[in-house]
Image: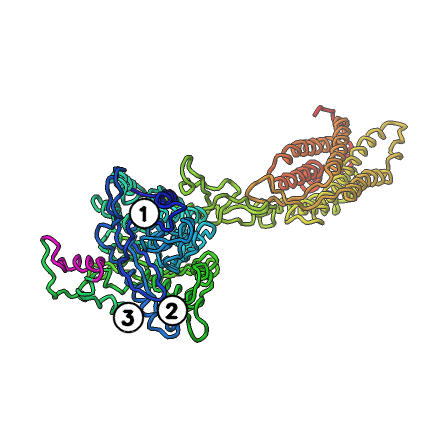
Amino acid sequence: MHWTSSLMTSVLMLWITGLSLGACNADLVSCRLRAESQKPDLYMDGDFVIGGIFSIHYYMKSEQHTYSRQPIQLQCSGSINLRGLRFARAMEFTIHEINNRTDLLPGITLGYQIHDSCAEVPMAIKIAFQFTNGVEPFFNYTDSCSKTAAAAVPALVGETASTPSISMARILGLFGIPQVSHYATCACLSDKRQYPAFLRTVPSDHHQAAALARMVKHFGWTWIGAVRSDTDYGNYGMASFLKAAQEEGICVEYSESYYRTQPRSKLERVANVIRRSTARVIVAFLASGDMRFLLEELARQPPPPLQWIGSETWIIDPEFLRFNMCAGAIGFGVPRSVIPGLREFLLDLSPAQALKSPLLTEFWESSFSCSLIGSSEGARECDGSEDIRALQNPYTDTSQLRITNMVYKATYAIAHAIHGVICNDTQCDKSAKFTPWQILDQLKSVNFTTKNGFQVSFDSNGDPVAVYELINWQVRKDGTLVFVTVGQYDSSKPRSQEFSISRAISWVGGQTEVPRSVCSESCPPGARKAVQKGKPVCCYDCIPCAEGEISNKTDSLNCVRCPPEFWPNTQRNSCFPKPVEFLSWDDTLSIILIVFSISGTFIAVCVTAVFYKHRTSPIVRANNSELSFLLLFSLTLCFLCSLTFIGRPSEWSCMLRHTAFGITFVLCISCVLGKTIVVLMAFRATFPGSNIMKWFGPPQQRLSVLAFTLIQVLICVIWLTTSPPFPFKNLKHYKERIILECELGSAVGFWAVLGYIGFLALLCFILAFLARKLPDNFNEAKFITFSMLIFCAVWVTFIPAYVSSPGKFTVAVEIFAILASSFGLIICIFAPKCFIIVFRPEQNTKKHLMVKVPSKAL
């Protein structure tokens, strides 16, 4: 039956109180104990007697209570826990060593009363009351039963397990009797409000749990199983570990508990959970007895290879090295030590000495399977040939002195505290009277180094500095398991430096690579984790980052959007600058447009040369040579201005390209408009009495071209002054690249420039269309009509193409419109004339030009 400490404490205190009240009244001067005193298993008298309590047996004799008679005396049963016996005898050895010293408690002899708690709460509580009240059957008082007797011991070492220690600490704390435990690791015992007189030389499980969680995180295990003892040690320890594991991002597939006195069905259920689990790492926060039962049950039907992570209770217990399924196990244990002289003391045991103690007698008889007094039925009588040095068991094995050293330190701490209370610089007063509270206060401030080199001190919670060795169960060449220290944990070091590994670890199955235990494989960079519904956070799916987002580390929870001018690579794990797109000089499309632009310019120059050479010929003179040369100059500028649209946009190029285009085209259309008006006026001037040409002679023609052009110049100046074009990075049109373009600045200015050109072109087209039927042999109005028709068609189709074209093609469309309209003008207006001049010189006569021809519709 598993007793909780608080319930048991309350029941027994009520029971003892009831016995006392029933045995005395105000007229009596003494009280008798109804129960027998528990005799110490190991005892030595002295000036001051120190108590000791250890878990030497694991069970207590039980009986069926009838409530009609007094219960039997509490007694331990089962086989001896040889480690517990070694702990008890280590306290003996330490007290003998202290008594032989002259610098510590000189002239003072320490005694001891060492008891076996059977690892059970009832026995621990009974012994706690006994340490408090003494062992005499009578308590004498001066006036009533309400007075409290003096404490039997000034301090005690123990208990071994956490749950009995909690029960004892609640009782002893009421009287201020210091209890220095060597193995009770429950973090709850650090609460000084509940356990004011409890101290320990073994680190608290709070540190062990943090160390285990840090280690599990270090090796990348995010999916683990957990099993614990259903005791204060296991429950508090596992709670601390699970909290630390959660902070480290570790998920627990299952968390099961078991206590050795629970039904076997519970043990089988826990074992089946372990067998069916997918976690390949299991953290076992179990007491040695519970762990042994669990391993024996698992051995019946072995689970898949598991990486065991052990708490210090069993990970350093040599008895478990026989379980090969735990090969490769790792866990933290208190540092290994050497206690000079202890092995000789343990082996210095003869049959005669063993007979002085029932405990040692039981040890001797069970070790050699003989009877010292001939009382054991069926057993041979010990004949003196037994050699204790030939034994190979935990009692004689002093190669792994870990917890034993905690007993050594605890005993020395009490001795130093007594020394501080009753001794001065030169001598000690063995008749000094003191209270347990004085010893407790002195214990809190002790700070010394033991003979084997270990520092002993306590913090405000009564805990030592947590220092652990990382223990690994490694297989030797002969197939046996051994403990190997592979690392260390020191809580006094700065965070992230507490845990260190000093040598290679042998994992489960003898492999050298760290085993994997994850619910889901890590998400690579470029993906994020999406938790699976209804499962722990360690179970997730890997979702690729959305467009425009990246994750640059493994197991990212979220993807991060790249800055506006950056774009992810194909793996979506890094942001790279977006490629900048513009119509560059080395682009294929640019080269084609440049060729056409230069070709157009060359044609314009060639036509100019032809016209200049034949400037006195009738066909050149008849078509207003001055306007023709000005038109050819403006066309040359039109061809060249298309080059300003090529290359990386800059502040000056953006302003130049639109204004140069607007002004040169207006100059060009103005010249064509002037030529159209001249044609109309020339026809009207052929009528008798008409003097219309004097109103539109060369001065007026120049003035009209200048006026039309100045209007466009004024529009451009206003545009550039108010809101000029500027280079702009277009990040919206394409997600994966940047379009470097010229922002219009003022859209009104741009469309005003374009609209004015369109207005002049439309006006020119209308006038030329009206003059298309003039009866000249060489009707220039007809060619102007065609040229304006092409010009207007190009620019009408340009508008939707310009608006809808993406990126650099927007600029290409604009250049194409400029070149197409320029080629349309030069071909329609000048090609027929050049053809006549070069190939039909006989038609380049005034007579031929003045011949009237029948008018025909276009």
Q: Position of residue 697 (x, y in %)?
A: 86, 37
* Quadrant showing the N terminus: top left
Whether residue 779 is visible here, answered yes or no, is no
Q: Residue at x 44, y 76 (%)?
A: 426
Task: Give the foreground label among 1 and 2.
Answer: 1
Question: Do labels 1 and 3 touch, CB within 8 Å?
Answer: no
Whether residue 11 is visible here, answered yes or no, is yes
Nearer to me, 516 or 237: 237
Nearer to me, 255 or 327: 255
Give, as a three-letter code, the residue at label 2.
Thr
Classify residue 195 as left or right of residue 77: right
User: Mark 2 to mark 3: distance in Å?
Assistant: 14 Å
**Residue 189 position (above or below residue 539):** below
Give, as a three-letter code, the residue at label 1.
Pro
Q: Residue at x 32, y 65 (%)?
A: 111
Nearer to me, 562 or 662: 562
- State the residue position of label 3: 341
- State the residue position of label 1: 122
> Which span is picked out in magenta?
356-377
Classify residue 450 as left or right of residue 857: left
Question: Mark 1 or mark 2, which has the lower sequence index?
Answer: 1
- The colour style of the image is rainbow
- State the residue position of label 2: 450
User: Mark 1 to mark 3: distance in Å?
Assistant: 35 Å
Corner quadrant of residue 853: top right
Question: Which secondary structure, mark 3?
Answer: loop
Q: Position of residue 474 (x, y in %)?
A: 27, 59
Corner quadrant of residue 756: top right
Q: Position of residue 382 (x, y in %)?
A: 12, 62
Task: Give the foreground label among 1 and 3.
Answer: 1
Classify residue 428 as left or right of residue 350: right
Crowding around mark 3 (Cα neighbors within 10 Å: few <14, some 14 to 19, many 20+) is few
